[in-house]
Image (cartoon, rainbow, N blue to C red):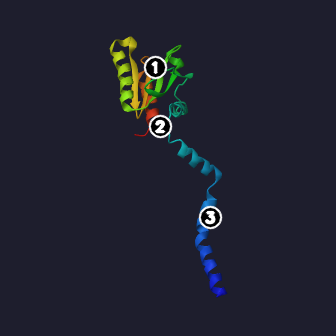
Amino acid sequence: MKRQIFLSLIAVTLILTPFVNVEAKVSKSESASITIAAKSKKVTTNSILKRFKSDGLEVGKVSKLNNREFGNIRKDGKRVLIPSLGKDNGGRLYEFKNKKDLKKAKSYYDELGNAGPMFYSHTHQRGLFLLQMNGDMSDRDFAKYVKSMNAVIKK
């Protein structure tokens, strides 16, 4: 009887040992990166701006927009200055509560651009986010911001 118990314990130990070792092989840094990856799935205006910077795109002073700029329909809004475009020039990055409100804001900027070249601005929407940049930015540069934003916001 003791022999059977002893052999059973050895068998259980041999079966469970690989699983214990797998857990032990996960380092603290791997664990931290898994946690960061899990947390980073939530996209925010800040995470998009952080991606712009990490992609080497120009991002100057960032400030929170006041409520008069779509405050009643947006979830978040940031003013982003782009120093190479001149003093107090840049764009805005919005997160909206729903697609309907996002489309209202995008059409506002698009229609404003139809009023004349002085009012033109670049716009790009992805998910519930809208990027609006000064029309003085080249199409080529704006495309870099679009690519960076799209990398963060998976459809």
Furthest toward the bottom, the residue is 1
Q: Secondary structure at mark 2?
A: helix
Q: Amino acid at mark 3?
A: Asn
Which is in the foreground here, disc 1 or disc 3? 1
- What's the CA distance linking mark 1 and mark 2? 24 Å
Q: Identify the residue position indicated by label 3 in the image.
A: 21
Task: Say above or below: 31 vs 143.
Answer: below
Question: Separation of disc 1 and disc 3 at Cα?
Answer: 55 Å
Residue at 50 percent of width and 42 percent of height: 41
Please give the residue where the numbered disc 1 appears in the rendered image: 69
In front of the other: 18 or 111: 111
Picture coordinates of residue 65, whole percent (x, y): 51, 21
Q: Earlier in the sequence, mark 2 or mark 3?
A: 3
- Kindly report which numbered mark, 1 or 2, lies closer to the viewer in this rendering: 1
Q: In front: 113, or 52?
A: 113
Q: Amino acid at mark 2?
A: Val
154 up-or-down from 78: above or below: below
* Left or right for 49, reference 6: left
Furthest-front residue in this view: 72
**Front-lying residue, 12 or 51:** 12
For the residue labelled by badge 3, is the local secondary structure a helix, a strand or a loop? Answer: helix
When asked about the image quadrant of residue 129, the answer is top left
* Residue 86 picture location, percent across and down: 51, 14
Look at label 1 and name its amino acid.
Glu
Q: Earlier in the sequence, mark 1 or mark 2?
A: 1
| Residue highlighted by disc 2 | 152
